[in-house]
Amino acid sequence: MYHSITLRAENLFLRAEKLKQGWLMVAQKIRNMEEFSAKCGVSRPTVSKYFNEPSSVRASTRQKIEAALEQYDFRPNLYAVNQNRRITKNIGIVVPYVADPFFSEVARKLEQCCIEAGFSPSTFSSHGSPDHEVEILEILRSMRPAGVLMAPIGRASHKKKLEAFCKEIPTVLVDSNLEGIGATFIGSNNFQSVPLMVEYLCRTGEPPCFFEMPPVNPNANKRRAAYTQAMEELGHTPHVIRVEGDTWEFEEIGYTGGLKLLNGGELPSRTILCSNDRLAIGLMAAAYELGIKVGISPECSLRIAGHDDHPFSRYTCPSLTTISQDYEAITERSVDTLITLIEHGKASKIHEDTLYEGRLIMRSSA
Amino acid sequence: MYHSITLRAENLFLRAEKLKQGWLMVAQKIRNMEEFSAKCGVSRPTVSKYFNEPSSVRASTRQKIEAALEQYDFRPNLYAVNQNRRITKNIGIVVPYVADPFFSEVARKLEQCCIEAGFSPSTFSSHGSPDHEVEILEILRSMRPAGVLMAPIGRASHKKKLEAFCKEIPTVLVDSNLEGIGATFIGSNNFQSVPLMVEYLCRTGEPPCFFEMPPVNPNANKRRAAYTQAMEELGHTPHVIRVEGDTWEFEEIGYTGGLKLLNGGELPSRTILCSNDRLAIGLMAAAYELGIKVGISPECSLRIAGHDDHPFSRYTCPSLTTISQDYEAITERSVDTLITLIEHGKASKIHEDTLYEGRLIMRSSA
DNA sequence: TGATAAACTTTACGCGCGTTAAATTATAAT
DNA sequence: ATTATAATTTAACGCGCGTAAAGTTTATCA
């Protein structure tokens, strides 16, 4: 939408300015759209129109403006623009914990989609703290965004404040759903992905137990429920192992919990399905430390599987068998939905939640 | 002229408001500072002063304002504020790749420091693309930030554009230095940390060879040089192994490069020092796949060490021996430096670059 | 060629706030 | 109580741009 100035053009300009001004070595800066429109030979309202939508002006006019843009380095003042537009072109993106590679990937893809759609994304991380999440909402409100893409922390989120926020600003929930909050929810279908994994594990060895931490978000709950259901449907007894921990340091939780579990000797199954990859990574570290071989090969005594296809799960030792969420589809669909919501108002609120299916990624840990 | 019109309209509005308040007890929405100051019983300029610096108004006045703040949630319009302030309270943060946990940690800490100092950070990730890095600079310029904290991509960065940017806006370089660009540089001292590791490795086993990818940034170059120097000082012959790859998927590069290397059979040493942890993680995955035992215990045939203390390196199998950079010190110092730069102008440009020392983290991989 | 629509120019208002100067009031110190 | 000082109020301007209305030019098509 806005045009960047090439370095070459800048240098040419500087040279021309120096020649023109002779003794004054100062390059003339364009201070505002008024000055710039004078250089264009086009009126300010037309230049304004151009910046809002280049195709809305005549081709000949556009050429004049773009020629000037190459010579003079001008961009409309962001704050003046946003103050005067009844609605900004900003989209807020909120993730619960950006240091979690899963969410940094999600954030990256969301950003990309927003930019492609002509919006300006601003990404925030709640850093795992519900208070900080609420603070972000405050900041967002002061940004008057056109809409918000939000992956909430989950169970600990301050739901009433979220709800109030969503009523004010079009918001699409991503990854983790909070019933009745936001215009729509887009995420993955745990009741498809988890049974897929359970079935695979049962088919290839001992039926799995389920390794989880206290459910910080609805996904965790759903995954446990999906596990139990799948096991029962296959005629097996489900076993859920819960470990303590309420931080977002999932690897640490999986590691310390894993040490306890594996030392205890009362393992209900030699196949462990973890509620997410980060937990699995911690558990694998614990197993390694205890000299327990993990994997599908005959000499191994433990199988471990995860969920999410964490970017590093490809490089664990052994590589982690997991479920891959359809990042691309989820992020694209989220942005699309939000934009129609922005453009067509709440009329399109009829949107049903969208759930994408996960893919089984068979590697060597299970 | 138009003020009278505004005032009249406002009176009408207030009257309507009184009616409404008598009817229903709905908390009225404040539209601007004018309205809010009326509710406070304080003049608008004073309220304005309060928001810029609460301690600059009398305690009794502050109480009035804060009492009103509790009743009517009002925040000054972000865009109007920033348009009118000669300089904003924004600080731009740029990292080369936010999906790299090292940088997401750095970004998180930088954000935190900025907030504590009363500034509003905006974080951007170059996503490993120099073009995108330049685009971010354009966006940043339009944000008129008070200053910028920048971890550049490095070798591939468009240096001239960075240089031009830094001349315009106070910028502190973090993590990766570009000679002559920016006001100061703050990072860690590779010529201390790498020798520390080399010495440790030599003392406890076979002197290491150095595993690196094409140096994407000055750090990589310095680490190699530091390795070579340290080896020579200890009377050993340095061996540098370079693997190909120009993306930011370091694990993948380490993995494929590692497979080739370890299959080749021409390994110069059974101890490998990697130029960073992510590369080491990939290499370890390759070793695992080839059935090569990594670690310090007697039955292992390969030692691998990294650099950076990547959040995940604690949970690799085996856990990764590495160098921990002093994140806290680096980020705090960066923000401090930037703020003095902002407040005292370029007068304080005398700042020398600051290098922090790394700590040896002995785990079980080497 | 003339009629009509489309694009443009001119003029002007308003957004919400920072900021300043002068006048006023509150507080502290003598 | 008087004075000096600090804090506040009042009034007003300007930031840079979106936007609207009315008049003018340019393009389009018969």
Image: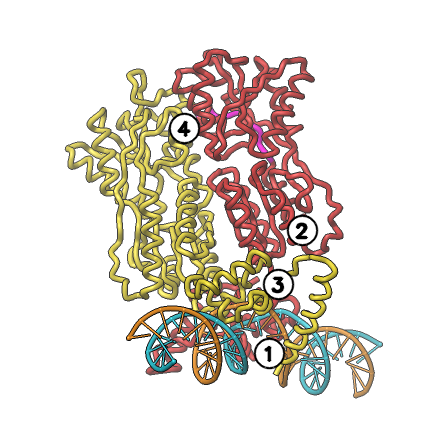
Chain colours: A red, B yellow, C orange, D cyan
Check if mark 2 and mark 1 are on a common chain. yes
State if disc 1 and disc 2 touch (CB < 8 Å). no
- Residue A81: in sight, yes or no? no
Is A319 included in the stretch rendered in magenta? yes
Q: Secondary structure at mark 2?
A: helix
**Residue at 38% of width from left, 66% of height from top?**
B168
Amino acid type, callout 2: Lys
Q: Position of residue A332 (x, y in %)?
A: 62, 45
Q: CA distance from mark 2 to mark 1?
A: 40 Å
- Residue A124: in sight, yes or no? yes
**Residue at 35% of width from left, 20% of height from top?**
B293
* Numbered tag placed on residue B315 in the rendering: 4
* Numbered tag placed on residue A167 in the rendering: 2
| Residue position marked by numbered label 3 in the rendering | B30
Quadrant assignment, res B148: bottom left
| Residue position marked by numbered label 1 in the rendering | A43
Above or below for B203 versus B103: above
Of marks 2 and 1, which one's residue comes earlier in the chain? 1
Instruction: Report the mark closest to the observer, 3 or 2.
Output: 3
**Residue at 47% of width from left, 13% of height from top?**
A301
